[in-house]
Image: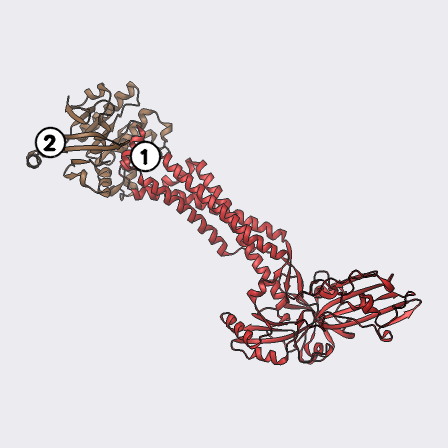
Chain colours: A brown, B red
Amino acid sequence: MTTTETAAATDGVPTASRPVYRLSGVTKTYRQKNRTVTALAGVDLEIPQGQLVAVQGPTGGGKSTLLQMLGALDRPSSGSVFLGDRDVAVLGDRALTDVRATEIGFVFQSFNLIPTLTALENVETAFAGSLANRSRAEVRERATTALREVGLEERLDHLPAELSGGQQQRVAIARALVKDPTVLLADEPTGALDEGTRDEIMGLIERQWKDRGLTVVIVTHDSWVARRAERRLHIKQGQVREV
Amino acid sequence: MFLTYLRRELTNRKKQTVIIAVGMALAIALVVIVSSIASGVQSAQSSVLASVYGVGTDITVTKTETPTSSSTGRPSFDFGDQGSSGSSSSGSTDLAQSRLAVSRGTSTLTAANVATVAGTDGVAAATGVLTLENSTFSGQVKQSDGSSSSSSDGAAQGGPPSGTGQSSTGQGGGGFGGGSFSVDSFTVTGIPVSGDTVGPLTSTETTKGRTFTTADAGKDVVVLDAAYAKSESKAVGDTVSIGGKTFDVIGIVASTGSASTTGSNTYVPLDTAQTLADLSGEVTSVYVSAESSSDVATIKTALQKELSSTTVSTESDLASSVSGSLATASTLVSNLGRWLSIVVLAAAFLIAILFTISGVTRRTREFGTLKAIGWSNGRITRQVAGESLVQGLIGGVIGAATGLVGILVVNVIAPTVSASAATSTRTGPGAGGMPGAGATAAAGSGTTAGAPAGGFGGGGQTAATTDVVLHAPVTVEVILLAIGLAVLGGLLAGALGGWRASRLRPAEALRSVA
């Protein structure tokens, strides 16, 4: 995509379908044992606002690297990654941190809750960056509401170890959504769950997607999960193609 | 969130908190105890010096005797005229003689010297004192058929009575076989009766009777050290024989410091002492107080220049002369204690740092997650540093409390250490022999043993030995030091742990999950 086309797309697309992500020529290489590994090889990709996207592919194909680019966790070796109108590739560390704090919600395969904090306190950790100056009462109220929305109002004071896998993932989803992010990125969100719980969690994500008009990107090995998405991408040897 | 997270981490990761806190506590307790004992030892040294030199003495001026071919420097008794000093009966001779002289190894300064010292710039007050040694020889010598025993120079030939000790070593008892005599000696210090602001009596308090007034000038009156008075069973109103004259006891003084004795066994008016010892206008030491402590070095230099043949000692010079078990304690504290503290402190810091870094490594996923959801490096560093700081503080508080208990134990035990403050460094001739005679040398009272030590050929050093109760004081500085070190240890560990946490890239942290 050329610069002219990008500008035209930005200006011409209605707000509702304006791309949240615009990746252009994104390449990511790593040095590994005296050789260069190319994780992403010139990826061009647009993801419109409000889309539910599933990313599949073999291990080592570049799924995690793509997720890191989308999640502003890393910068590409070359190319641009626009999130809204900000190019993540050229942002400084502080700005990247603020992008993660305000615009991106993360859900991980292993839930990644802080083991010493209660469910409520885990959700409260999401108020970071420019959101960190909210009042204690507001933070508590919003965290409580978020946990109520995922059906855990009875488990506010439970530690992660006292919750089931499904409940922990619900807390993680509440933590990701409590700050009203632009994008929800989920890395194998059902990978550690049994089938019944998997259905529950996918149902919860789909409901939030529809209710909030969220843009959701799910990296998954599970074809059942992928088939629930509006759009399916396959990534192999650093190249992305539509399925 | 900071405090909640901090509290949860400390309470839910008890093992790490306890290990770091205990390590820090041990180190801090050791530092507190060693610092306190070091302070106590220093105070004891000052106390010993004060007991010898008085309070407020910045400099002392003394003169060391220059050995000459005709002078042995030690007291001698002359029994040539037995009519005056002994009596014969049924084959034995009773001998008794008292002698008052300047302590061995010490020479005298003139009144002009005292005036010179007093006139030196920066000197606030100067007091000359005359320290003498009263030696009494008494006993019975059995006469034999030998031809030399009744000779007037028998003592010199036979050795013992002369006390010179140089030519008598290893000689046989000869005519003195079966005799028995004793030598008693004590220190006599002549001090001005005008109540000077500096001098030996400034570190004493009058427990009975009174000290000198100007009306006592030239009179045969004496003030006794409390310990000496007790050992000799003397009280105010009794009499004491000094240099063959009878003195009235007018008062008893005791040390105001932790030392058990004062600097001398007895105190008499200066002019009386000078007359009795035939040393008119002479003194053995000049006690000097400076107008300002910053002037001490300058005054010392000026006095060394003015009075080239004298020994000018400042308080720090004198501190190095304190010996005995106090000096051993001082060495122990300053060497072993200090190094032990440093080693244990370094170990505690290392434990805190290693555990913090290991904790950060173990929590890679946790910190990676926090970074992924928008926590800044600074916030994560503050969180880690805060945890370490509190762990260090807990250790510091426990350590300070343990240290205070340790100090309390030391103070309850109140160990007594002995100390000698040497006032002269000259070493006398070799040991003298007392062949064939049962001799006892009573040198002062039990604990005031050192002063006349040279009487029978031991070391020629004149020293005052005293017992000091070692107190370990608790000072605000020590507590602040403990808290400061704990904070420092916590901050150091927290800074390194936080630095390591901040270096974690969120992507790498998440990759470790996979």
Residue under pointer 1: A122
- Is residue A180 visible in the rendered image? The answer is no
Label 1–label 2 contact, CB within 8 A: no
Say yes or no: labels 1 and 2 on the same chain: yes
- Which amino acid lies under the numbered mark 2 shown in the image of this protein? Ser
Please indicate whether residue B254 sits to the left or right of residue A176 in the image. right
- Is residue A30 visible in the rendered image? The answer is yes
Please provide percent x and percent y for residue B382. Answer: 34, 44
Q: Quadrant of residue B384?
A: top left
Q: Give the structural element (helix, strand or loop) at label 1.
A: helix
Q: Residue at x 83, y 64 (%)?
A: B181
Please provide percent x and percent y for residue B206. Answer: 67, 69
Location of residue B479 with respect to A213 vertically, above or below: below
- Which amino acid lies under the numbered mark 1 shown in the image of this protein? Asn
Q: Residues within 10 Å of mark 2 (few under 14, many from 20)?
A: few
Please provide percent x and percent y for residue B485. Answer: 45, 50
Observer-nearest of B395 and B46? B46
Please indicate whether residue B26 sits to the left or right of residue A176 in the image. right
Residue under pointer 2: A17
CA gap between label 1 and label 2 equals: 33 Å
Question: Looking at the figure, which quarter contains the C terminus of chain A?
Answer: top left
Location of residue B116 with respect to A198 vertically, above or below: below
Observer-nearest of A189 and B495? B495
Q: Return the chain for callout 1.
A: A
